[in-house]
Image (tube, coloured by chain):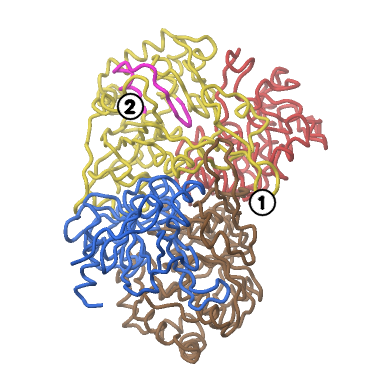
Chain colours: A yellow, B brown, C red, D blue
Amino acid sequence: MNVREKPILTLQEAVRRFVPDGQELLLGGFAFSDPTAVAHEIIRQGRRGLRVIKSSGGVLVDQLIGAGCAAQLLSCHIWNSVGPVPAHCFRRAIERERPAPIAIEELSYGALSMALLAGACDFPFMPTTPLQGTGHFTERTFWPDKLGVVRSPFGGEPVTVVSPLKPELGIFHVHRVDRAGNAQVFGPLGETRFAMAACRRLVVVAEELVDADVIRGRPELTVAPSFLVDAVVIEPWAAHPSDSYGYYYRDLAHHALYGEMSRTEDGFQRYLEEWVFGTQTHSGFIRTLGDARVRELMTRKEPWW
Amino acid sequence: MNVREKPILTLQEAVRRFVPDGQELLLGGFAFSDPTAVAHEIIRQGRRGLRVIKSSGGVLVDQLIGAGCAAQLLSCHIWNSVGPVPAHCFRRAIERERPAPIAIEELSYGALSMALLAGACDFPFMPTTPLQGTGHFTERTFWPDKLGVVRSPFGGEPVTVVSPLKPELGIFHVHRVDRAGNAQVFGPLGETRFAMAACRRLVVVAEELVDADVIRGRPELTVAPSFLVDAVVIEPWAAHPSDSYGYYYRDLAHHALYGEMSRTEDGFQRYLEEWVFGTQTHSGFIRTLGDARVRELMTRKEPWW
Amino acid sequence: MDASRFERFLLTGARCIPDATVVFVGFHWPMLMARVARRLHAPGIIVVYENGIVEDHLTALLPTSPCDLVAAEGAPMCAGCFESLYMWLGAGRVEMTVLEAPIVDRHGNVNTSVVGTYHRPKVRLPGSGGGTELASLGRGLLLVSASTDRRSYPERVDYVTSPGYLEGADDRERLGYKPGSGPQILVNPLGMFRFDGRGEMYTAALHP
Amino acid sequence: MDASRFERFLLTGARCIPDATVVFVGFHWPMLMARVARRLHAPGIIVVYENGIVEDHLTALLPTSPCDLVAAEGAPMCAGCFESLYMWLGAGRVEMTVLEAPIVDRHGNVNTSVVGTYHRPKVRLPGSGGGTELASLGRGLLLVSASTDRRSYPERVDYVTSPGYLEGADDRERLGYKPGSGPQILVNPLGMFRFDGRGEMYTAALHP
C-alpha cells in the first residue's frame, strides 16, 4: 500500500500546533461525539480569543466560555445536554458578561448545516429553511451576510439562502482512523460528513487507530478520506461525557455533576481545578473518572469490530 | 417489533401495478446496480410511452428504447458500459428514428444529481455546475425550466441553479431489505440516497430479504427507510449484467454479446427473443445464463454478511 | 403543578399521535410523549430525530435527548441531518411533528432563545437547535408546554426562535413557508388550543 | 496508429500525473493512464471516481469503467457523487483531473454528445456523464485524445459537452466557472498542447 501517512500527534501537540490564540475553530459532534477532551486541553493551555463554531454547544462550549477561551461563538444550541439543566457559564457570559463578554451569532440547525454544506461544495449559497420572521434572520452580530433572500428563476415564493461557511480549522471526534487519516464513524451522523469537508484544515481525534484493512472492510463508514485530514490524534474517551456510538454511553451523572458545580463561578473554577487542570491530561481525566465508572459506561465490554 | 410491513411483489406484479403505459419512471443505478431485470419485465409486458429517467442509461435504457417502450428520456449518459461499444438502439432511435423517435433531455451528471437532491428536499432549486455555454444548458426539449441563473445576494458571479426533479415513480436495485421496506446498499452510492428520496413512489428490487435484525446490525447502510418505500420485490441477480457490489461482478462477456447482437435491428430482436421473451422470467434469464457463469460472476461463493 | 395535571398533559399530547404515523419529535416532553404513545395505543409509529436516527420500536432505555444514543440502539437507519431535516421533514415525508413550546405567543411563535433584548437578555435560553426547522417545515405540528405560568404565554415573544403564524396567518405563505406547515394544536396542562384562520390561538378544550 | 505511438500517448499522459496527488479520472484512457502512473512513478496517487469510490492502491483487476466495481475493492472510502463531484472536485480538494476528449476544438471544448445537429445528429455519442463536471470544476485539467484524425479536432465543436474556454478565456470567469479550472494540457499521440492567455490551444511539444 502506498498512501501518505499523516502525523499522529498527542492532544497537547495538536492543540499547540493547530490552535493558536484567536483561531477560528469548528468543533465536531452534535451532543454526541463532542470532542470534550480537546476543550479541556485548550483550557489547560490557556488559549484566548478563539472564534468557536459548534452546532450544539453543550458542556464543551460552556467550559470554553467559562474558562475565558472563546471570544466569539457561532452556534445553534448551547445547553447542558441532560434535560432542563442550563449551560451556566454561557448564561453568565451573555446575561452578565462574566467572566467576559462573548459575541454570539446564531442560525437554526438546518441553516448552519446548509452553510457548512455550501462551504463543503464551494457553492455560493444553499437554499435553507425560510427563516424570515425569526430572530436568527434578523439578529446579525459578526456575520452580517449569513442569510439572504433570492427569487427563484422558476417562480414561486422568495427563497431564503445561507452563505457558505468554511471554517479555518475543524477538530472532530471519530471512532477509528488508519495511519493515512481515513476516518470512520458508526451510527447517526448529524452534519458530520459535510462539516468535515467544509473545514480548510482538519484534525481527527479517534477512539482508536486501526489497520488500513479494517477501514477497507467497511468503506461505507468513512466520513473523511485521507486527503481531507491534516493530522490524527488517538485519544480514547475523548468525547466523554457525551456519547460515542458503539463505544460508550452518555455519562448522565457527570453531566449532572458539571451542571451542579458550574452553577456558580466558584463552583466552575473548582470543576476546572479538579477535572481539567488537576488531571493534566485526558488519560488523567479518565483515571480520575475511575475504572468502575468507565466499565459501566462502555457500550460493550470488548471491541466488536 | 411493530412496523408496517410492505407488500412483497413478484417482478411481474410490480410492473403490472406500478408501471402502466406512459408512466414517468426513474430507474436507479449508475452503471452498477442497474435494475435490468425490471427493464426486461417491462419489455415482456409490452409497455409503451414510458417517460424514463436514468442517470447512466447503459444496456438497460438501450433495450427499453430498442423494444419501443420509451417515448421520452431524461439522462446524462447512454452507452454500453464496456468501453467503446455504443448503445446501438439509442443511436438508431436518435439518428434514424428506428424503431421510433424518442424525445431526449440531457443534463450533466452533477446537475441531474442536484435536481434530484432539490426534489428530495423540496428545495425550489439547487446550485450546480456553471453549465452556461454547454449544450445541456442551451438545448431544451421537454423540460424548458430545467436550468436557470440567479444572482447571489452575497455577490460574485452568476449562479446556475437546477430545478427540482421529483419522479412520479422510482425503481431501485438494492442489496437487501427487510419486510418493513428498510433497504440497504453496500459500496459506492452515486446519487442513490437522494434519488430514492426524490421519488414520489418507490419500489425496491432487492437481492435478498433479510430479518429486521440484520438491517439493525448495520444501520448506516440503510439508503431508504421503510416510510419511503411502497413495495418490495425480491429478485436475485436483478442487476445483471451490471455489477452488484459484494454480490456479483459486471458481466463483461454479456455486455459484449449484447453489443454485438444489438448492432442491427434484427440482431436486437434475436437478443430479445432469446434473452427476454424466451426466458419468460428473470429466473429463466439466470437459468439461461447458466450455473457455471453465475458461479464465475459471484463476488464471493457464499453470503458473508 | 399536581401530578395528575401533568400526567393529563403528557397523556393528551401522546394521544394526539396516531398509530402508524411518521413522527418527528424534538427534545424533552415530545420525546416522552412519543414513548408514552408507543406504549399505549401507537406501537407502530416511526420516530425520527434531527441527528438522523430512525426509531421504530421501544428502546430499552428512555433517551434523555434525541442525541442520547440509546435512542439509536436497534435503529433500522442511522443517517444524518440532511436526510432528517430536509428529505424527511422538509419534503413532507413526516406526517406529524411535536415540539416543546416553553414560551409561546398567541400566533404560536415559540421562543427558546432570549427573554429581554437579544444582546443583553434577562434570561438566556438554549437557542434553536432543530426547533426552527420543526416549526418551519414540519407537517401536522403539535406544540406542547408543561407550563401554566402566565409569563410562558406572552402576547408577543421577545424572539421568534420557531415560527408560528408570525404576525398573522398570511405571513407564512408570503415568506416562503410551505402549505401544511405551521402549528395546528397546542397542548398544555390546562387543555388543548387550536389556531383560527388568522393564525390566532383559541381554546378548543379544557381538561375537566 | 502504430503501437509505439499509442504507447507514447499513454505514457505521456501517465507522466503528467505526479506522485502523491489526488486525481479525478474519467472513463477510458484516463483510468488506464492513472493505472500506468501508479505502476511506474506514482504509487501514492489517490484516484477518485464520480460514483464516490476512493482508490488508493493498485486494484487486482483493471476496471473497465469507473463503475466497474472491481475499482472499489479494498477502497478506503465508498461515498457518493455529492462528495466526489462537489465536495472533492468542485471544492478544489482534487489536485488533478484527467478527461478523455475524443472531439475537441481549439478552445479545449469537448464534445461527447452529437456530431451534427442536436435533434437529428449524424452521429449520436454517449453524452456528458460526469465529464461536464470534470471540465467545469476540476483543477489541473488534462485532456487526452487517442485520435489523430482531423475530424477529432474541429475548429468549433458541434455541441459543448465539457466546456473548455468556450469562445475565449474570459468566458469562463464571466459565466461563473472557478479560477484554476479549465483545460491546462492536451495530450494526444502526436504530442502535448497547452492553452494561451486567450484560451487557444498551441503546440507545446511534439513526440520525436
Q: Residue at x 76, y 27 (%)?
A: C106
Q: Amino acid at mark 2?
A: Ala
- Can the viewer see residue D89 in this picture? yes
**In the rendered image, which quarter is residue A195 located in?**
top left
Q: Amino acid at mark 1?
A: Phe
Which segment is the magenta one? A36-58
| Looking at the image, residue A78 lies above or below residue C172 | above
* Element under disc 2: helix
Direction right: furthest residue: C197
Mark 1 or mark 2, earlier in chain: 2
* Element under disc 1: loop
- All told, the count of numbered labels is 2
Q: From the viewer's perspective, is B54 left or right of C208?
A: left
The chain letter under disc 1 is A
Percent of width and height locating residue A35: 36, 30
- Which residue has dot 2 on it? A37
| Looking at the image, residue C48 lies above or below residue A281 | below
Q: Residue at x 37, y 44 (%)?
A: A185
Q: C99 and C86: which one is in front?
A: C86
Percent of width and height locating residue D196: 35, 52
Q: CA distance from mark 1 to mark 2?
A: 48 Å
| Looking at the image, residue D96 lies above or below residue D118 | above
- Which residue has dot 1 on it? A154
